[in-house]
Image: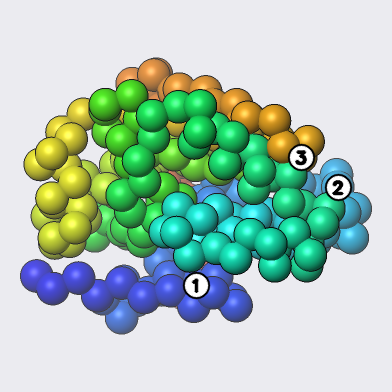
């Protein structure tokens, strides 16, 4: 089956085989695992803007396509986060392979975007970046979800299949980029139950949606 996964960035909408499906972060927000309800709108919007810009910069840096000096001029308050990643890359043996790579599951009807797949200390690694605390956005469950989708989508995606063939074991990490430019902090997630927890959240929301549909009928 040919992959048919599209993404509309402005509305943040994934479409799988012509049908809109929830995102990994959408599932976590809807379940309450990620909860920003107590944060003022202006603060939240500023944080989201920062995260988007920094993620894009890291993406371009990993692909050797970032004009760092222009970024320093345009985003002087945020360049430290990029410097943090650069410092990490200089200190650790990490090679990025795939950046901002979309994945999906036809079984679970969910999609998402992996920040970075690469090789860290000689082993396959799935990295998810944060400009704040990774635990505030449940990076453990996010990375578990992306790993689940990675394994399924790899059957249809040649680049993922090649990565998995070379690196059948993929470790999961949350990466905190530091504003002061010091080396990024990483945390490895090892709990095998993380995947089951995410799948439970997906199934719970499916049940709720079905019941709401029955009541509306």
Q: Position of residue 161 (x, y in %)?
A: 13, 51
Q: Residue at x 64, y 38 (%)?
A: 84
Q: Residue at x 13, y 50 (%)?
A: 162
* Labels 1 and 2: the sequence-earlier one: 1
Q: Is residue 14 visible?
A: yes
Q: Residue at x 35, y 41 (%)?
A: 95
* Labels 1 and 3: the sequence-earlier one: 1
Q: Position of residue 33 (x, y in %)?
A: 61, 38
Q: Check whether the beta carbons of the residues at disc 1 and disc 3 lie within 8 A of each other.
A: no
**Which residue, given by chain and number where applicable, does mark 1 sit on?**
13
Mark 3 closeness class: few <14, some 14–19, many ≥20 residues within 10 Å: some
- Viewer-nearest of discs 1 and 3: 3
Q: Looking at the image, is 29 positioned above or below residue 89?
A: below
Answer left or right for 207 relative to 139: left
**Which residue, given by chain and number where applicable, does mark 3 sit on?**
179
**Which residue, given by chain and number where applicable, does mark 2 sit on?**
39
Q: How far apart are labels 1 and 3 at the CA level?
A: 29 Å
Q: Position of residue 2 (x, y in %)?
A: 13, 73
Q: How far apart are labels 1 and 2 at the CA level?
A: 24 Å
Of residues 99 and 210, which is closer to you in this image? 99
């Amino acid at each position: 089956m040919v992959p048919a996964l599209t993404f509309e960035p402005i509305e943040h909408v994934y479409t799988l085989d012509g049908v809109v499906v929830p995102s990994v972060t959408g599932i976590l927000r809807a379940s309450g695992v990620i909860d920003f309800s107590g944060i003022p709108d202006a603060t939240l919007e500023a944080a989201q803007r920062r995260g988007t810009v920094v993620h894009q910069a890291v993406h371009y840096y990993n692909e050797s396509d970032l004009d760092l000096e222009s970024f320093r001029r345009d985003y002087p308050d945020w360049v430290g986060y990029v410097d943090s990643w650069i410092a990490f890359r200089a200190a650790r043996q990490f090679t990025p392979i795939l950046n901002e790579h979309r994945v999906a599951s036809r079984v679970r009807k969910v999609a998402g975007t992996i920040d970075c797949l690469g090789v860290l200390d000689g082993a396959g690694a799935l990295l998810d970046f944060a400009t704040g605390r990774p635990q505030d956005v449940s990076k453990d469950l996010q990375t578990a979800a992306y790993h689940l989708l990675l394994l399924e989508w790899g059957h249809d995606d040649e680049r993922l299949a090649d990565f998995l063939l070379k690196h059948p074991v993929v470790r999961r990490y949350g990466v905190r980029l530091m504003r002061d430019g010091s080396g990024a902090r990483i945390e490895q997630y090892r709990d095998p139950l993380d995947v089951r927890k995410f799948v439970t959240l997906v199934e719970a929301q499916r049940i709720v949606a079905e019941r709401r549909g029955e009541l509306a009928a």
